[in-house]
Amino acid sequence: AAGQGLPKALPPSCCSEMSKMSVPMEGVTVEQEEYWHSETVEKVLELQESRRDGLTHAEAEKRLEIYGKNEMTPPPKIGFLMKLFLQINNILIYILIAAAIVSGILKEYAEVALIVGVVVLNVTIGMIQEGKAEKAAEAIKGMLSAKATVIREGQPTEIQASDVVPGDVVSIKAGDAVPADLRMFETSNLKILEAMLTGESNPIGKHTHEISGGKSVALGDRKNMAFSATTVQAGQGKGIVVGTGDAAEIGKISSMVSEQESVKTNLMIQLEMFGRWVSLFVFVIAAVTFTLAKVVAKEEVGTAFQSAVSIAVAIIPEGLPAVVTISLALAMQLLANQNAIVKQLPAVETLGSVTVICSDKTGTLTKNEMTVQRVQTTEAQYPIKGVGYSPELGTIVDPSTGEELSPEHKGRVRQMLEGVVLCNDSGLNVDSVNGRMTYVPVGYPTEVALLTLGMKLGIPDLHLFKKSHPRVAAVPFASEHKFMCCVHAASADSDAPLILHVKGAPDRILPRCKNQVCGDDLSRTEPIIAKFWEDKAADMSSEGLRCLAVARADWDRSKVSDEMDADILLKAPEPFLTLIGLVAILDPPREAAIEACGVAKTAGIQVKMITGDHPQTAAAIAKQLGIVPPSLPSSEVKTFTGPQLDAMSEEEMDRIVLGCNVFARASPENKIQIVKSLQRVGQTCSMTGDGVNDAPALKAANIGVAMGITGTDVSKEAAKMVLADDNFATIVRAVREGRRVWDNLVKILLYNMPVNFAQGLSVFFAYVLQLETVPLTAIQVLYVNMITSVTMGLMLAMEPAEDSIMERPPRRKGKRLFGRMVAWHCLFVSACIVTCVLANFDIELRRYPEEEARRAGTVVMTTRVKKARAAAFNMLVFGEIAYAINCRYLRSTSIRMETITGNKWCWISILITAILQIFLTYTPAVNDFFSNDAIDGIAWLRILGMMVAIFLFVELEKAIGPKYLMPLLRQAGLCAPTTGGIEMSEEEREHFKFLATSASTIGMPIRRSRSLSRSESRDSLPHGTNQPVSHGPPARKAGRGSSFDHFPFGISHEQAKSYDPV
């Protein structure tokens, strides 16, 4: 930082907002923070060793050598081999590679080729979907100004922006991109748009006075600073460069993006755990099989080893990675069709577990299009319908009826407010895109909102209207006097009377008004009642609305001159204006966002607004969205600001983060604070945003969501998902799809694992029961894993969402894919299928006479054995088909009409699988390759009968298992009890209080899902795969639960205790 203990001869360094000065104190060097906005201009010039007429060329060259280019440090790039390793470094890919090695040992080269093909497919899909390098900092570089005007040796000089150095004096004007962080020392009506950095919707007026407060002053309130990469909207000014490259505010954000590590998704964690358990189980079974083959079957060591690895191939789910990858890719494509572009495959599933959505306000929850919300006259306060700059979407409403004003009354209001169109230097251009009318704003957002109001009131063509009322003179808006006034002719006639139109801050206009329009009729006036207007302006301002007063007066032509200035009002001998009314403006929430917030509440998801805007504005938007109760007075909405968060410890932050839904004046660091605090208290957090300031938090969140249209390249690169339509409602649709994906992954695993176990255990029990030979060959098992299981798995991946999917609370964090119910079904269903497979194999062997005796632990391949294996093979496949139909519904019976009509891919998959089985069984040479032979009708009747039996057995287990079997298992200590209807420990009760309080914070009812009847408990859910309520971590020992006793609209702990723990 400037003056950082450097010798006077050396130029200062280029720290942005803050400098650190070494101050000796009793022999100890202490760093004292110095903030540029809190220093006088003269002090800043002294610290930067600069002058108002700029540096010399020699000084600038020297500083450029010392401090380098005004550019961001590029991020380290990941090489191709590292990208490849990151794709392969997955336990399931390792399982596939192990299977290929095992198959190679068995010299089953066709199997090796199949498995290697699956590995290549998985890695290729991953590389395509996730192989984009981190380009956030490079995207920021693209936003920087290419040219800059600096003052060198007293002369304006245009240079490359990358050559700007600390201490340079930079001149900026309307349309320029600010090349570096500047401390302004000269401004003339300077307004800068900082939405991408601070979230502030309106351009910020700049001044040169120092601002006390140091670090406590939020970035958006440092109005004597101009920040790198922001855009000058109006006016001009000069400033001293105090931050370049990485030391500028935008550079700090670039550094934060690079420092944030991507959060590993729950799916990745669960699949890694699953892979480890499967690997362990395979190793144990293979070892036992080797022992049995060697000791019991008296096989040679090589043959016994081959038997062991055959079982390993059977149990390893070679097709599961492909099914998971393809199902996620299909979900990604479906989401892309719904305008949600997911950049990483596992992020699809993460969406379904989101418990909190943290959203930026400007451009995400709102359209970033200022809109007139209300018009106050002496007669009434009129709501204005419609959001954004499209006038055809709105109109003025009669507050007494809720309907559009009558044409006659609307015409009178239009006549009163024509001044907001005439006293206006902005534009609203009409364009046509794909046959649809679009409106392109030009100029100040506030003035464009007034033009839209004029069109809603019935002015069809703004250009023609202004032309028919020619401007004669004007006084432009300036922050010093806070109003604009224009003199216009009443018509295009040369001798038409002149009218002075004025708009501006109420506190500046009201004292200069003598009369007010009454009865919404310009021809009728009465003395102004100032108190009435002051109260109305205060009421609307307290709700976060920006108020403008509109007035007019007749004007004498003799007073028109080129020298007209603000003194025509400021120095008028007495008030002479007639007040028309007040206009209230806001960047309102999208209508779709309001609806989406309601859906999120029903789904048990908290929505939090994090914005750089003012607290009052944020509270007003939050009330309209329903994030906080709409009936709550704005002054009572609990809102924390960035400086307040800066002063908190992690412990204090964790106590308030779930109890507050509105955070204002938040910096990029604050957004990361909030995200990490939510993660610490056990929440799965989504963060949405569109600006550069959102990028670090987007990357730190479990699922970062960027805006595709208004979003900066930086935010898009940092996020895991991009909304192509910038619609908050799309996030909620994506959450629904994420929940469907999770449900279907559970179905796939519930189907896949028992089938794989059945394959391996069929071979295993052939040794245990000392059958003549194994019922399945390695090539048959691999075929089932790679073709049948994948086909049926994809069918399950295409299952539609259940009706109540968005009425369930989010699943708890860390919920396992491979839970107790999957384990139980591995045993129960495997036993059913293994029994049927071995029974068919043994019956077929007994139906035909032995052709050759068993010898030396091997069997010569005979027609008899082939027929037996064909029966076992087909029994396995058709048993899988039956079980796949069972798996379509986790929580209820599959014996229903929707089983036939709900998923067309189900019957397509079954038809394909059945046709392939017939082909493999009856086609010469092919059936020989698969160790099959043709079987007769009796065998088919037996197979189909057992197939139906498997289906009915599983359906029976669904009906009676949770109600009768699970209690028995719990009594035997084989299964831990659920939380429903039992005594809870104090720690568990703290969990529930944590949930209940935060849930009521967003108005979420604590109730059972509609899919349950009142008499049912958690235990009665089929398969026990209910979605438990998401809740926080155990209470910390410092009595942390007590901090939730007094939420502004929460419930007490005593009330929480009375709820059913479900």
Image (cartoon, rainbow, N blue to C red):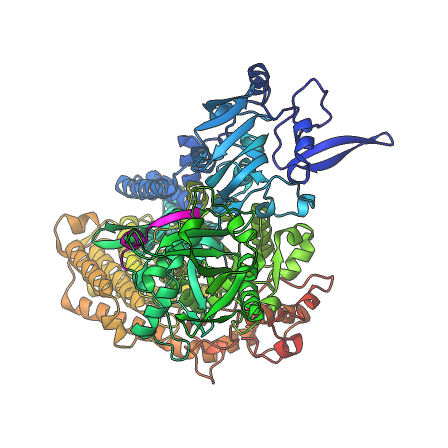
- Residue positioned most to the front: 558
**Residue 86: which quarter of the image?**
top left
* Count of marks, rendered view: 0
- Residue positioned most to the top: 58
Measured as percent of width and height from the top left, residue 868 is found at 23, 59
Measured as percent of width and height from the top left, residue 390 is found at 32, 58
Is 471 colored magenta in this rendering?
A: yes
Q: Which residues are magenta?
A: 460-474
Image position of 24 with respect to 192: above or below: above
Which residue corresponds to the image point at 27% horizontal and 48% vertical from the top-left? 779
Measured as percent of width and height from the top left, residue 885 is found at 29, 68
Measured as percent of width and height from the top left, residue 139 is found at 43, 36
Is 854 colored magenta in this rendering?
A: no
Q: Decide which of 214, 427 is in the foreground and name it.
A: 427
Quarter holding the N terminus is top right
Image position of 42 with respect to 352: above or below: above
Q: Decide which of 743, 417 is in the foreground and name it.
A: 417
Determine whether, in the image, residue 880 is placed left or right of residue 402. left
- Residue positioned most to the right: 26
Determine whether, in the image, residue 1040 is placed left or right of residue 937. right
Q: Decide which of 702, 232 is in the foreground and name it.
A: 232
Determine whether, in the image, residue 1062 is placed left or right of residue 556. right
Image position of 297 with respect to 1: above or below: below
Which residue corresponds to the image point at 54% horizontal and 45% vertical from the top-left? 205
Which residue corresponds to the image point at 54% horizontal and 68% vertical from the top-left? 533
Q: Decide which of 1011, 857 is in the foreground and name it.
A: 1011
Residue 785 seen from this side: no
Residue 955 seen from this side: yes
